[in-house]
Amino acid sequence: MEKLWENKIRKIEPYVPGEQSKEKDIVKINANENPYPPSPKAIEAIKNFSAEKLRFYPDANAYPLKKALADYYNVEAENIFLGNGSDDVIALCFQTFFCSEKPIAFPDITYSFYPVWCRLFNIPYKTYKLDEKFRIIPEDYREENGGVILPNPNAPTSIGEGLDFVRKLLEYNQDSIVIIDEAYVDFGGTSCTELTKEYKNLVVTGTFSKSRSLASLRIGFAIADKELISYLEAVKNSYNSYTVDSLSIAAGVASIEDEKYFNETINKVLKTRKRVVDELEALGFEVLPSSSNFIMATHKDYDMKELFEYLKTKKVFIRYFSLPRIDKYVRVTIGTDEEMNTFLNEVKEFMK
Amino acid sequence: MEKLWENKIRKIEPYVPGEQSKEKDIVKINANENPYPPSPKAIEAIKNFSAEKLRFYPDANAYPLKKALADYYNVEAENIFLGNGSDDVIALCFQTFFCSEKPIAFPDITYSFYPVWCRLFNIPYKTYKLDEKFRIIPEDYREENGGVILPNPNAPTSIGEGLDFVRKLLEYNQDSIVIIDEAYVDFGGTSCTELTKEYKNLVVTGTFSKSRSLASLRIGFAIADKELISYLEAVKNSYNSYTVDSLSIAAGVASIEDEKYFNETINKVLKTRKRVVDELEALGFEVLPSSSNFIMATHKDYDMKELFEYLKTKKVFIRYFSLPRIDKYVRVTIGTDEEMNTFLNEVKEFMK
């Protein structure tokens, strides 16, 4: 029997999230998660959360967390937008800021969700090739467009660009909204949040999932001029008023307030990253210059897909992309020193 | 200076969430929250959540919670969809299931977010008047449409309908998706989840925010045939893969497993509701027959807006809607016995 209601349904190809092994005793360095737990103060905020208050809706405006972020980034609470992870924040940005008929612009090698959102929201897009060293060419983005989005540092290349680069993008794009996705910026990148005061068309997004070790709690944010934030809030409040839950607000505030722990954790990751890069280079690997908590590495004498598959059999999970141009690389998240020792030992075994 | 990027932005009227007082020592019976805390087991699940696991992304499929709900509703995990509160679930349903050119159908007096989502997603809609007793007339929904959505029990009327009513809707709408929003069903309504086995075009939505006292944690769900759930998952996974956070999954599972506490809490609310209705009727109020954790009440001799304003000055917060046909009513959430005594005493004071 024909089902006529089928014609009223939107059928899209499912986007499949990255593989997450359920196995125990694995080295999980495939999702760019932080190897260290969140601030003990964030953990305490969760444990001490009033059981009596769980029955209430969260503060729809998540004001305490906006205030904490505003103080941290030296802006006002009205310059901050919050969402259920930075994917939620960016998806709402696409719906709010990319509403012309012109194609939006982003790099050919970048966060894989951008074209997915374009398809979901029927936004035309055009990609621009990274150069042979996997750098973004800012001059490409002089072409007329419906908006610009790119991660800085870029993913999965790990390469970060400086403020001059972002300024160039903004100068070339005075008639579009420019979104800089700073998911990885805390690991040695250069944040452009201060430029939101100068450029009214700049939106900077961030997340608590990487540098703040709170991927489980889904906290993402955007920083921009108040006018842009107000448009974003209007769309968000027409979709779901209560996206950030009460425990996330409490844990997020505590995390921001514990700057000492935050800096210590970041420094540990950066120190480990340096050592891993040095050791891989000593083994003949070529590693892209990373400003992130992960690295992209290749070896002229070995097949990286084979390395990826080999490591999987050893319960070391890294990431391999079967995509043009980057299929000769593997992406490796920086874990603890112990995890990276296991990784390096297994790489040496593989090379034997 | 003209800002050309303004033309690329979507500017919509902000939807303003209901007023939430920050004052202490108030009687907050305006948001249909549960007056009792969640199951002690849910609270324990939060406190005992492994700090070490907070750094990981949640299970994108939230499988443990799907399994718990499936067991509870006697369906399979593949029949369950989860989201960040039922607003997120329903917004995704609108995007997935209401994709024809025909107007979708819902009552003129109902959940105020339905027309907001229609405007956001450019979905045409047509509303059908409740009868003079605020009942939904199922025959109205025989008209050709792009889909049907209604809450059962309806909000803010509090009135619930039986399985025969839902069957009628489904018989009249074999060519559309029919969504029954059961946010309040646990408070004495009739759930139609079992009909999802019989009708492949039925979607039932629910929430942990009311009967399970977990509004703070944002857990909503849908139950439907596997095919419909798969379309919903594809859209969700093109938007944000990780909508339900790890603590919500853990607390949600514990809540479902504690059926004894759940039943006790519901029974307390129902007992209080009966007493409040009896007392209001003794004072000359007319109260609509409620199958929800709130009531709609009016009094022929008093202005309900004045009652609402008066109670506010006494720190008793109820809800009043300045809308045609229901502007002679107030909506009152059923709180604890103590809260309702304060409410009733203040009502008597007002009537003096």
Image (tube, coloured by chain):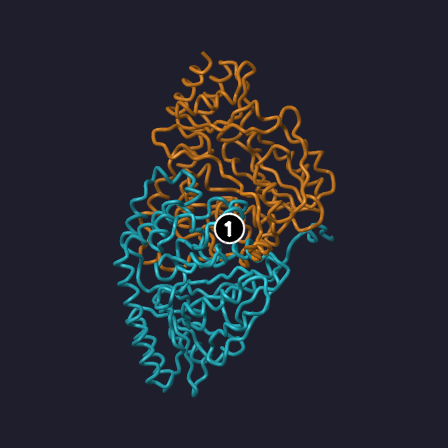
Chain colours: A cyan, B orange
Residue A337 in sight here: yes
Task: Decide if residue A112 is on the left or right side of residue B108.
Answer: left
Q: Chain of mark 1?
A: A
The residue pinned by badge 1 equals: A232
In this view, the residue in front, B344 or B71, is B344
Residue B289 coordinates in the image, percent (x, y): 56, 24
Quadrant in which the N terminus of chain B is drawn: bottom right
Residue B264 in sight here: no
Indicate whether B253 appears above or below A37: above
The residue at the point 45 percent across, 16 percent down is B350
Quadrant in which the C terminus of chain B is drawn: top left
Q: How many residues crowd around disc 1 within 10 Å: few (fewer than 14), some, or many (20 or more)?
A: many
Residue B61 coordinates in the image, percent (x, y): 48, 56
Tally the numbered discs: 1
In this view, the residue in front, A133 or A49, is A133
Indicate whether B132 appears above or below A24: above
Indicate whether A348 appears above or below A128: below
Task: Decide if residue B167 is on the left or right side of residue A53.
Answer: right
The residue at the point 49 percent across, 55 percent down is A88
Quadrant assignment, res A337 = bottom left
The residue at the point 48 percent across, 24 percent down is B308
Amino acid at pointer 1: Leu
In this view, the residue in front, A153 or B217, is A153
Residue B3 coordinates in the image, percent (x, y): 55, 56
Indicate whether A323 appears above or below B147: below
User: Residue lying furthest top in this view?
Assistant: B352
The residue at the point 29 percent across, 52 percent down is A257
Residue A10 coordinates in the image, percent (x, y): 64, 55
Q: Secondary structure at mark 1?
A: helix
